[in-house]
C-alpha cells in the first residue's frame, strides 16, 4: 500500500479545473492508497470551519467520502488555510497534524511540514505568520461575520501577491541553515514540504549524514503527488 502526499492545490472557484482534478484524484488514485497527507494550502483561503463557500464545501465532501472509504486522511495548516479547526476534522474525517511532524511509514521516518516556517529569510512574512497563528488573534478573527472574513481574506491575498512580487526570489525559498537545524533536531534524514512551488528532490549532507529534502509542487497546471511505499519516496506528476 502507498501513502500519498500533496500540497499547494490552492483550490478556488476562480480556477475550477484544480478542484475538479483533485476530486477525480480523491475518487480514483487516492482510493487505492492507505493514507493521504495534505501538507497545507489545499484551499486558496479558508475563513473558518463555518466556511460555506460551495466550491470549498464540495471538496470537503469529497474528502469525507475518501476517509469514509477507509483511507487515512491527514492535514497540515498552510499559510492560506491556517484556520482549520476541529469541525474541519469532523467534516472531512481527517486529522490535523502539527507542523512539523515526524511520520513513520514502511520502516522509515520522514519529517512533514508545510514549508512556510522554513523561509526564515522573509522576515516580514515570519512576523505576519506569528500574528495569524496567535490564538487570541484567531479568536478575534473568527468572531467576525463570514462576509467580513471573506473580504479580509481577499485583501490578504492581494497583499500577499504584491509581497511575493516584490521579494527577491532567493528570500522566498527555504533557508538552508533552518532546514539543517530542523533535520538535526528531529534526527531524521528526510524532509518533505511544499509551499515554495518549486517541486524537486534535493540531496544534502548534515554532519556526514546523507539527507533528502523533497518539495511537493503546486497544482496550477498539473497534479504533483509524492508516493511513499516499500520502495521509498517518489515525486510524480499527474497531467491534467
Ligand atoms: Mn503556502
Image (cartoon, rainbow, N blue to C red):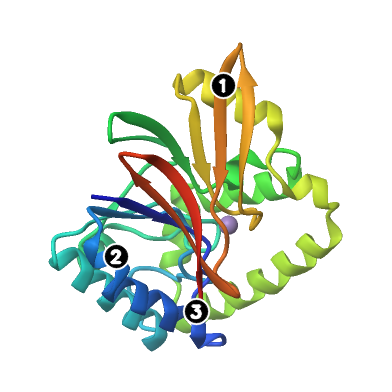
Label 2 residue SS: helix
Coordinates of residue 85 in the picture (x, y in percent): 32, 58
**Element assignment for label 3:** helix
Rendering quadrant holding ligand 1: bottom right
Q: Looking at mark 1, is its residue's CB closer than 8 Å to ligand 1? A: no
Q: CA distance from mark 1 to mark 2?
A: 31 Å
- Left or right of residue 199: residue 43: left
Front label number (1 vs 3): 1
Mark pair 1, 3: CA separation: 35 Å
- Residue, disc 2: 30
Q: Residue at x 48, y 84 (%)?
A: 147
Q: Residue furthest front?
A: 231
The image shows residue 8 at horizontal and vertical percentages of 53, 62
Query: Is the residue 55 above or below the residue 121 in the image?
Result: below
- Whichever of callouts 1 and 2 sits on the residue coming sooner in the sequence is 2
Quarter residue 6 falls in: bottom left
Q: Nearer the viewer, residue 151 or 2?
A: 2
Q: Which mark is residue 18?
A: 3
Please, is residue 182 above or below residue 217 in the view? above
**Residue labelled with disc 1:** 210
Query: Crowding near pointer 3: few (<14 within 10 Å), some, many (20+)?
Result: many
Amino acid at each position: 500500500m502507498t501513502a500519498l502526499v500533496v500540497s499547494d492545490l490552492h483550490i478556488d472557484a476562480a480556477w475550477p479545473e484544480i478542484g475538479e482534478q483533485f476530486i477525480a484524484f480523491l475518487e480514483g488514485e487516492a482510493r487505492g492508497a492507505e493514507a493521504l497527507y495534505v501538507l497545507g494550502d489545499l484551499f486558496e483561503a479558508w475563513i473558518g470551519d463555518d466556511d460555506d463557500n460551495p466550491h470549498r464545501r464540495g471538496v470537503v465532501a469529497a474528502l469525507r467520502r475518501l476517509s469514509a472509504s477507509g483511507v487515512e486522511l491527514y492535514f497540515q495548516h498552510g499559510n492560506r488555510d491556517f484556520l482549520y479547526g476541529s469541525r474541519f476534522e469532523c467534516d472531512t474525517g481527517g486529522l490535523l497534524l502539527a507542523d512539523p511532524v515526524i511520520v513513520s511509514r514502511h520502516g522509515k521516518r520522514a519529517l512533514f511540514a508545510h514549508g512556510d516556517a522554513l523561509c526564515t529569510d522573509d522576515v516580514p512574512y515570519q512576523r505576519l505568520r506569528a500574528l495569524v497563528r496567535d490564538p487570541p488573534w484567531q479568536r478575534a478573527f473568527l468572531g467576525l461575520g463570514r462576509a467580513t472574513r471573506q473580504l479580509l481574506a481577499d485583501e490578504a491575498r492581494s497583499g500577499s501577491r504584491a509581497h511575493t512580487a516584490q521579494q527577491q526570489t532567493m528570500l522566498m525559498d527555504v533557508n538552508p541553515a533552518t532546514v539543517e537545524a530542523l533535520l538535526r533536531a528531529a534526527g531524521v534524514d528526510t524532509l518533505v514540504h511544499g509551499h515554495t512551488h518549486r517541486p524537486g528532490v534535493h540531496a544534502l549532507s548534515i554532519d556526514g549524514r546523507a539527507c533528502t529534502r523533497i518539495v511537493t509542487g503546486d497544482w496550477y497546471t498539473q497534479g504533483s503527488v509524492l508516493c511513499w511505499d516499500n520502495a521509498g519516496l517518489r515525486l510524480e506528476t499527474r497531467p491534467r
